[in-house]
Amino acid sequence: MMRCRFVLRMALGIVGVLIVAPAPRAQVSNAGKAPETPAPQVKPGPWRGVGPVAPCVLPWGGIYACPPAPTMVAIRAGRMFDSLSGKMLTKQVVLIQGQRITDVGPDGSVTIPAGTRVIDLSQATVLPGLIDTHNHFMTSRGEMTADQALLVATKRLRDGLVNGFTAMKEMTSHGNGYQDVTLRDMINLGVVTGPRVQVSGRESSGEDPHRARTKNRIPAY
């Protein structure tokens, strides 16, 4: 049985993430204690840009539409690549709860709970999510501002996810400070759509990444 995340091209889309809002910061009293601070009050809806459903609250304030709660999904795979055995299996069923695979096996051996959404991929091939272990999605090489690099990186990550990469390792922000950390946190909150990422932050080197480049020196990525 293969326990891994699967790429479901052009069928499953983005699976919902359960967001747990962090506890609000406590205020320190004169006695040096840190009493609990009540959660911020959210006025009744509808909320502008969010709708009638209660929104999620960002740690620093502000609201956004919460990602949908995780649901059970069943995949009927005509072919499924088992990366552990290196074999191509046929007529398999994959059960997914939220972002976790709960069961995998031949059709008929896996029970699909009543009311579960079933996606028919009987004419397709399902395979584990790809992992990019060396990526430079924050790279600007001095050709973009830090804000421009952040926006481009957001699109690069979305494109990577759509093309089957469910995890990426970013090597360095190349002078863009720690915006890669911010981008990772926004993905984890569900504000930005992208794969799971590990980031490195700003590199430690003797070269100024914002110094003017020429074609004979360091080319832009």
Image (tube, grey):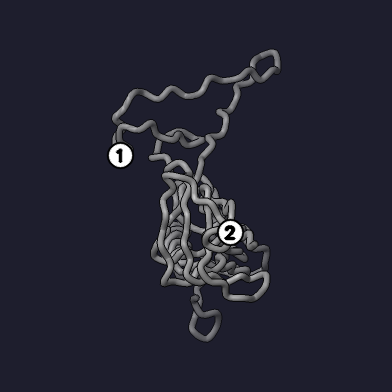
Q: Which mark is residue 7?
A: none
- From this viewpoint, which residue is outermost toward the bottom? 216
Quarter of the figure with the N terminus = bottom right
Q: Number of numbered discs present?
A: 2
Q: Who's the residue at 57% across and 51% down the image?
A: 100
Q: Which residue is mark 2?
A: 104
CA separation in Å, label 2 and label 1: 39 Å
Residue visible at 51% across and 35% down in the picture = 59
Dot 1 corresponds to which residue?
49
Give residue 168's position: percent from left, percent from top.
Answer: 57, 63
Q: Is residue 182 visible?
A: no
At label 2, which amino acid type do we have?
Answer: Val
Nearest-to-viewer mark from 2 and 1: 2
Front residue of this view, candidates 118 and 30:
118
Residue 7, above or below 19 = below
Quick check: 76 above or below 31?
Answer: below
Q: Residue at x 63, y 59 (%)?
A: 3
In the rendered image, the vertical position of residue 181 relative to residue 92, given as above or below: above
Asked if 50 appears above or below 169 in the picture, the reply is above
| Mark 2 or 1, nearer chain start | 1
Mark 1: amino acid: Gly
Secondary structure state at the residue bearing disc 1: loop
The residue under the point 40% across, 25% down is: 42
Residue 53, x across and y down, in percent: 35, 33
For the residue pair 149 and 192, the one nearer the viewer reads as 192
Would you call the spot at circle 1 few (<14 residues within 10 Å), some (14-19), or many (20 or more)?
Answer: few
Q: Quadrant of residue 148?
A: bottom left
Q: How far across and how far down the image is residue 39, in percent?
A: 51, 23
Q: Quadrant of residue 199?
A: bottom right
Q: Nearer the viewer, residue 158 or 114?
A: 114
